[in-house]
Amino acid sequence: MSFVKEYENKKAIIFTDFDGTVTLQDSNDYLTENLGFGLAKRLELNELILNGAMSFRDAFSQMLESIPTPFDESVEYLLQHIELDPGFKETFHWCEQNDIPIVVVSSGMKPIIKALLQKLVGEEAVERIEIVSNDVEVNAEDQSWRISYRDETPFGHDKSRAIRPYSEARPSGSQQKLFYCGDGVSDLSAARETDLLFAKRGKDLVTICRRDKIPFTQFDSFKDILKDIKSVLSEDVTIDQLDENKRAL
């Protein structure tokens, strides 16, 4: 379900990646490294993605197919080991109080995302967070599973497609601000659809933003993101003042 019409008059929308952004570890990498074919093979496939020798979709499928663990056990394993950014909970509650929607835009799988979010903010709260992601097909008999991609692209889920309807729905002259929070190269196309990208410090995404002059500012945790969003919406600072490319001029 899309909330484009419902959100078009909100003063801001926060779009966020999930793994490595809301979570402190990437849940899919964690499964692959610990229950699948391991770190070395995962890094080998990552290199092929970065070199353009293999699509993200094909490499990601190989990673997940290497995991023999039933789906329900895989989810439970992640609940025991994956930590979430504690600043996200504070951000979520502030957004609730200020009528600002949060939309999770992820290459991960919806049941895993929902389970991890429930652990952090509670089951009822999760129902108020829009999740745009891939899904999973689970065999009810033996809990074997495989990813179900959202679209036909080499990414499996082109995140810019999820955000573009929101940016295009803004009325002419609208003051609505669109923010995106991410840590990976797959977040780049999504970021181009928004006004400001929060890029996780120390990641390749920061280097690319500097190279391509994409408006961005770095963050270490969601506490940083919340502080900056509050400042922009209260007009204490402008997006240009936060943009590290503009500040470097």
Image (spheres, rainbow, N blue to C red):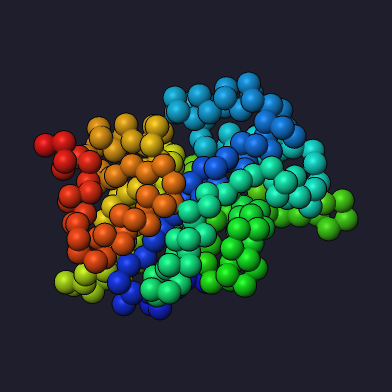
Please say whether residue 151 is visible from this viewpoint.
Answer: no
Left or right, 186 with respect to 26, comes to left
81 vs 162: above or below = above
Residue 141 appears left or right of 47: right
Question: Of all residues shown, which one is farthest toward the right?
Answer: 141
The residue located at (47%, 50%) in the rendering is: 17
Q: Establish if 100 lies above or below 82.
A: below
**Pick the front one: 13 or 92:** 92
Residue appearing at x 49%, y 30% in the figure: 49
Question: Residue visible at 65% across and 58% down?
Answer: 119
Q: In which quarter of the image is the C terminus?
A: top left
**219 or 31, which is in the foreground?**
219
Which of the 4 image quarters holds residue 65? Answer: top right
- Which residue: 71% across, 55% down? 137
Q: Position of residue 59 (x, y in %)?
A: 58, 34
Judge from the rendering whether residue 16 lies leftward or rightward of residue 178; answer left or right. right
The percent coordinates of residue 195 (x first, y second) are: 26, 56
Count of marks placed on residues: 0
Q: Percent position (x, y) of residue 205?
A: 37, 36
When asked about the image quadrant of residue 125, the answer is bottom right
Determine if residue 11 is in view: yes
The picture places residue 206, in percent across and down from the top left corner, at 33, 36
